[in-house]
Image (cartoon, helix red, strand yellow):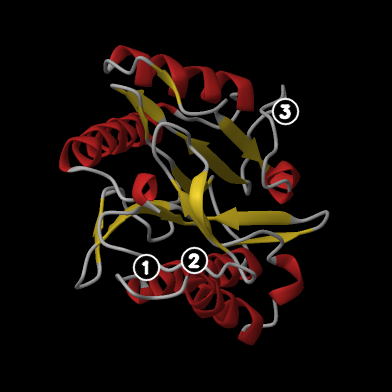
Amino acid sequence: MSNMIKTPDEILRIMKAAAMGDICFSHILEYIRPGMTELQVSDEIERTLMSLGAEGLSFPTICVSGVNTTQPHGEPTDKVIEDGDFVTMDFGAVVEGYCGDMTRTIAVGHVSEKQREVYDVVLRSQLAGLDACRAGVRCRDIDAVSRNIIEDAGYGEFYIHGTGHGVGTEVHEAPTLNSRSDEILAEFMPVTVEPGIYIPNEFGVRIEDLAIITEFGIINTVKSEKELIII
């Protein structure tokens, strides 16, 4: 339990890492263009984080587009980013030994009604999950809040992972926010909230923030926009 709860110094390091992620995301929105490959964009994410002073990466950067967004942990490929694609980017900087972790899904050129609907469901799920977080709440109840919104919208079978996890010197630490977790949130635990919908052969959406648990709710370390961005 004790190492799930972070000291003020540890939280500050995590917040610095998260701030680097926000700056990087802003840069990528200016950088990314149709015709680039997933690998070009993931390389630019990593180059940017390192240029901002990261000592490393929390994990290998995910940048997937189009049908590849159906893979929650897809690896970047030579696939070209095209008009009409969703692009999901999941990345994190390491600062003084502590990890950042954020995910944003953006659209290129235009979106279909179905893409817009699914994005909206994931965003509502993610915001509700964040809103439910506070000290004393069971991790499985956070998962239920996020999952119920996706299930009620008819996409439950496409939400194929847990809602979040703790973060510290490792990017995946206790507690685990899933339907089986008996763990209870406590003040100064950093946790991710990252629901997703992945429709086979079509597209996927995931939105992830890294939140510090408090008695009154959360402090969200990730400030980047979450309304659907179409570049």
The residues tagged by marks 1 and 2 sit, at their Cα atoms, a distance apart of: 17 Å
Quick one: SS at disc 3? Answer: loop
Side of 163 where 8 appears, left or right: left
Seen as rendered, the residue at the extreme bottom is 152
Question: Residue at 24% across / 32% down in the picture?
Answer: 13
Closer to the observer: label 1 or label 2? 2
Q: Nearer the viewer, mark 2 or mark 3?
A: 2
Distance between the alpha carbons at the discs numbered 1 and 3: 33 Å
Judging depth in this view, the residue of 173 and 171 nearest the camera is 173
Name the quadrant containing residue 76: top right
In the rendered structure, are the residues bearing label 1 and label 3 in contact, judged by CB atoms less than 8 Å apart?
no
Give the residue number, with chain letter if any, for mark 3.
79
**Point 59% across, 75% down: residue:** 147
Q: Amino acid at mark 1?
A: Leu
List the residue tagged with mark 2. Answer: 183
Residue 19 lies, with reference to residue 204, above or below; the image says: above
Task: List the residue tagged with mark 1.
Answer: 130
* Quarter of the figure with the C terminus: top left
The tag earlier along the polypeptide, 1 or 2, is: 1
Q: Nearer the viewer, residue 87 or 151?
A: 151
Q: Is residue 227 above or below residue 80?
A: below
Q: Quadrant of the N terminus?
A: bottom left
User: Which residue occupies 55% across, 70% down?
Assistant: 182
Image coords of residue 210 (percent x, y): 37, 50
Q: In the image, residue 96 lies at what x, y percent?
A: 28, 21
Which quadrant of the view contains residue 180? bottom right
Looking at marks 2 and 3 on the same chain, the residue that comes earlier in the sequence is marked by: 3
- Mark 3, Cα crowd under 10 Å, few <14 / some 14-19 / many 20+, is some
Give the residue type at disc 3.
Lys
